[in-house]
């Protein structure tokens, strides 16, 4: 079973990472919530801290990550609970594959703002990437407590349950994800994978074919669909699907 799980690991990591990259950067342009300052000195300090944060954001967007980190850390020296600075530092650590450091920073952001959904989703992602699947699932569940129809959290939770070999739960959450986002290719693919693992072949076939319909270059969907065709005794279709999978991705492993 371990070999089987590791075999698919690269697929799952890639899918969740896409969610991380696509959804993560909105905070960098969100202003810090305003506070009422009681003295001119504190007002000046607050403006200076905000200016540092904005400079960090500009460096971050320009790809100057070390410069951005330096500015974010200066923000935290003045305002240790600044959720934006912690979050953006986490983003840099995550981009560099420093997932334990990213985890710490996302958690720090959430201490200041427990309802910061992007931070919680990305915390789940970095836990997942450290193979801490049960804690990752818990973070995605917390998102759904606040935002029950969040398609990203639903998708990530479903994929995490596949990694945990809990295919019933995976099917439940991926089906719900598709109810709110019916054109998400990944949801169709992983739903098909979960069905295939349960030998629910007609349902697996339909889900995988839908993934290919939405993305005709989805090599992994062709690969799993080939196994479904083979299990259904359709040798020609199985061979064609396997050939197509390797045409699209020669690095696939049987």
Image: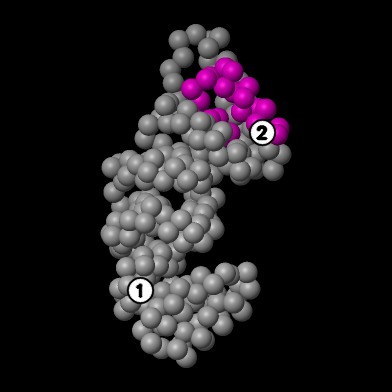
Residue 73 in the image: x percent, y percent?
A: 62, 25
Is 70 magenta? The answer is: yes
Question: x and y percent of residue 30 in the render?
Answer: 50, 37
Q: Is residue 224 left or right of residue 88?
A: left
Foreground residue among 128 and 34: 128
Q: Position of residue 187 (x, y in %)?
A: 40, 63
The residue closer to the viewer here, 209 or 36, is 209
Q: Mostly what secondary structure, the magenta segment? A: helix
Q: Which residue does the image show at 52% across and 31% down from the upper left?
A: 105
Q: What residue sits 59% from the left and 18% below the top?
A: 77
| Element carrying mark 2 | helix
Please indicate, yes or no, whether residue 50 appears anywhere in the rendered image.
yes
**What residue did someone put label 2 on?**
68
The CA span between labels 1 and 2 is 46 Å
Of labels 1 and 2, earlier in sequence is 2
Compared with 3, 136 (above or below) is above
Image height of 193 relative to 236, above or below? above
Indicate the position of residue 149 as horizontal and vertical percent values.
Answer: 31, 52
Residue at the spot of label 1: 204
Q: Quadrant of residue 94?
A: top right
> Within 10 Å of the Cα at label 1, are there few (<14), some (14-19), or many (20+) other Cα atoms?
many
């Amino acid at each position: 079973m371990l070999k089987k799980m590791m075999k698919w690991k690269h697929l799952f990591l890639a899918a969740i990472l896409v969610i991380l990259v696509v959804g993560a950067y909105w905070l960098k342009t969100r202003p810090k919530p305003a506070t009422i300052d009681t003295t001119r000195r504190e007002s000046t300090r607050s403006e200076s801290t905000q200016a540092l944060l904005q400079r960090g954001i500009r460096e971050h967007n320009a790809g100057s990550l070390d410069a951005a980190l330096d500015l974010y850390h200066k923000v935290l020296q003045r305002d240790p609970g600044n959720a934006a600075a912690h979050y953006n530092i986490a983003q840099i650590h995550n981009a560099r594959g420093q997932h334990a450091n990213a985890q710490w920073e996302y958690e720090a952001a959430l201490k200041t703002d427990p309802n910061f959904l992007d931070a919680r989703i990305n915390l789940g992602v970095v836990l997942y990437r450290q193979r801490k699947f049960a804690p990752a699932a818990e973070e995605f569940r917390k998102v759904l407590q606040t935002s029950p129809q969040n398609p990203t959290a639903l998708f990530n939770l479903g994929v995490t349950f596949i990694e945990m070999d809990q295919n019933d739960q995976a099917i439940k959450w991926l089906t719900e994800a598709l109810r709110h986002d019916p054109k998400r290719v990944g949801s169709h693919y992983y739903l098909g994978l979960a069905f295939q693992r349960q030998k629910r072949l007609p349902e697996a076939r339909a889900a995988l074919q839908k993934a290919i319909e939405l993305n005709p270059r989805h090599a992994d969907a062709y690969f799993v669909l080939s196994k479904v065709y083979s299990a259904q005794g359709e040798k020609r279709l199985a061979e064609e699907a396997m050939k197509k999978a390797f045409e699209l991705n020669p690095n696939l492993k049987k």
